[in-house]
Amino acid sequence: MKKFLVSLLVILALGIGVVFAAVKMLPLDAVKPQLQEKFREATGRELKIEGDLTVSFWPNLAVRIGDVSVSNTIWGRAPHFLKLEELDAELKLKPLLQRRVEIDRFILRSPHIYLEQNRAGEGNWVFETADKPSVDNGAAAAAAPAEKDELQLSFGELKITGGTVHFEDHADNSKHVLDNIALTIEATELSAPVSVKGKAQYRARQILVTFDADRLSAVLAGELFHGGLTLSAQPFMSVDLKGRFFPADGLYLDAETRVQLRDLNGLLHWLSPTYTGHIPFNSFMFETRRLTAGKDGSGFATKIEDGTLYLDDLSAQATAALKTADGRAPKIELRAALQDRLDIPDMVRRFAGDTGTDTAETQPQAAQTAAAAGWSQDIIDFSALRAFDADITLDHQGLVYEKLATGPGRTTVTLSGGHLVFNVPETAADTGRITARAELRESGANTALSFALKTDDMPMRPVLETFAATDKLTGRGSAYFNGTARGNTQAALVATLGGTAGFDLRDGMLHGVNFVQIAQLLQRRLMDIGLGDGGTEFADFNATFTVENGIMTNQDMYLRGPLVEAKGSGQVHLPQRSMNFRVYPQMILQQRTVQDLETGEEAEKTTGLTVPVNISGPWANLRVRPDYQGLIRDVLSDPQQLEDAAREIGRELGKEVDTIRGGLQRYLDGGADDLRKLQESDEGKDLLRGLFGR
């Protein structure tokens, strides 16, 4: 930065040098070569003065130099580093008698500066300087008094009009132009404050800037000074900061700051038309009593201490840092206390841009099957996760995930190279607790997702409404789901889902499934019913699942209610949105506590007739069908079950057992067609009446 400021002073030195030469009454033709030689020695660059050089002595000393240029570095692409249409300077005569140089007017007209940076990161604004012999302390002390004889310098009107700054980066061949530059500089002398007001255009939009500092000499030397800067480019941005500049080696800024950025993607596209990324927010604003910016190892860091951040409708008290380094993605470090609840699906939607591209033909067959059942095949673009890295800790007022909400807690998010880790330690939710963790590794169609969710003593309805899209189950208890999936569409993620899951509930209702009605199917001689608006009250309901390729397999479902007990097993086919379960609902005729003779453990024993049924079909149209064949096999294989059930309902079957068994065996041997006749024939009706006592 210091070298850049010094290089800009070359222009000022040029005009002053001509003025000094004129004061000493040197011939103008002799001035040019002397200036060019001194300039070459000081900078290593060539100075050309191809226009007129005129001097007038009344009423003030005035100098005009036309068509000035400074050569570029040897590797530069532009023909010049500087091209100046005219330098116009005027000095007051009277102060010269007191050995003071008061510049009454100093105007640069149409300066064109060509800045370039090569692939090695070197800038053409760094000028070479001739090696100077070292001076020992004694010589320096002897030379010190001579400084008192130097001319004193002060300023009047300083202006730049019609300026242009070109910048070209050789690494990516990007080019930027800041034109129509107009600056007015107010400064009385080097040791006095300086004020700058200016405007310019960048890609057809006007930029306004004001700057002030307590010492002009410190600004020019890149040393510590106090000042302020305002910058605006409507409608995108406004910046206002006030504090210390160059407060320490490697630290460029330490200031109270307020920044407002609007239409973030529009801003980035304005700054770089080749920008193709997407920032998942529209506006950003922060204000802080301390912002620092400077070197951080081999990179650069901007830090906010105890600031207030606003990101769209989110607000937080935060300490933050943005770190950049060559060859690495920017990194955000954030410690924030949110003032509102955090809507997780909203955050996911922001970062997972939807391209709306149908890719059914390129997806695996399992994903195509899931798509046919209604799961979306639109691409979920997670590529924004590679735009930056992050280490974020959020203290929040609650998390919201659709119909599931938690109380205040802490959430951590880390992001590195497209690897996102989202962690929610145990947090209060309703009167229970919830713990969650998710990891996502962005890799296009092979994006990998893993997650672990656990709830304790929570109402299950909001959990199931959120994660299983069903409201058919109420009750309190615990649940878990540990899973993995792969893909970048909803259909692919569902089709590759694997893991384990389970729940253990109490005191609730299974809506739409009436196991009491199902248990009475045979008594009412029904072959097929749908699931209706009724339900089954339960005191306990639990099940565990293994999940593979989106298919949830269960072997141990158990439900116990005041009127019915049910056991079952089966599968929930998520990709096809269907299920196939075999359930054994049992009307509770008697329930008593029995003790195991070997272990001494006590358990509840239910007496009643078990009626096996199959519950299957698409979720939107599940059907319940009794398994007559299974029922009859159970009765034939365990006739004591028939007698026990009959005895509990107050009937003694006696010799009727043999009659019922014989009749059922004949129908069983006849196959499915004869089983239907069992419902229709008089003999069959008599057998069923004997079986159920109706």
Image: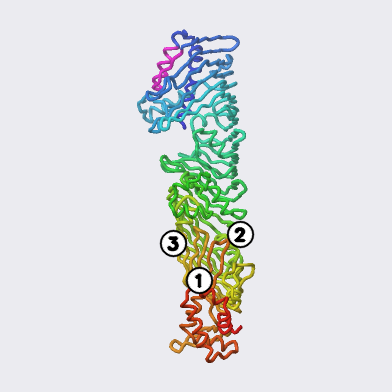
Instruction: Give how far across and how far down residue 214 sits, in percent.
Output: 57, 33
Looking at the image, residue 649 lies above or below residue 579: below
The crowding category of the residue bearing disc 3, from other C-alpha atoms within 10 Å (few below 14, some 14 to 19, many at least 20), is some
Q: Main secondary structure of the magenta part?
A: helix
The crowding category of the residue bearing disc 2, from other C-alpha atoms within 10 Å (few below 14, some 14 to 19, many at least 20), is few
Q: Nearer the viewer, residue 231 or 394?
A: 394
Q: Is residue 567 visible?
A: no
**Helix, strand or loop under label 3:** strand
In this figure, what is the number of numbered marks?
3
Residue lying furthest right: 533
Q: Nearer the viewer, residue 590 or 468?
A: 590
Looking at the image, residue 231 lies above or below residue 589: above
Under mark 3, the amino acid is Glu
**Helix, strand or loop under label 1:** strand
Which comes before the other along the chain, label 3 or label 1?
A: 3
Residue 582 shows which numbered tag?
A: 1
Which comes before the other along the chain, label 2 or label 1?
A: 2
Q: Which residues are magenta?
A: 32-49
Residue hosting label 2: 403
Instruction: Give how far across and how far down residue 60 sits, in percent.
Output: 58, 12
Which comes before the other along the chain, label 3 or label 2?
A: 2
Asked whether the beta carbons under mark 2 and mark 1 sit within 8 Å of each other, the answer is no
Under mark 1, the amino acid is Arg
Mark 3–mark 2 Cα distance, whole angstroms, equals 27 Å
Residue hosting label 3: 548
Q: Is residue 46 magenta?
A: yes
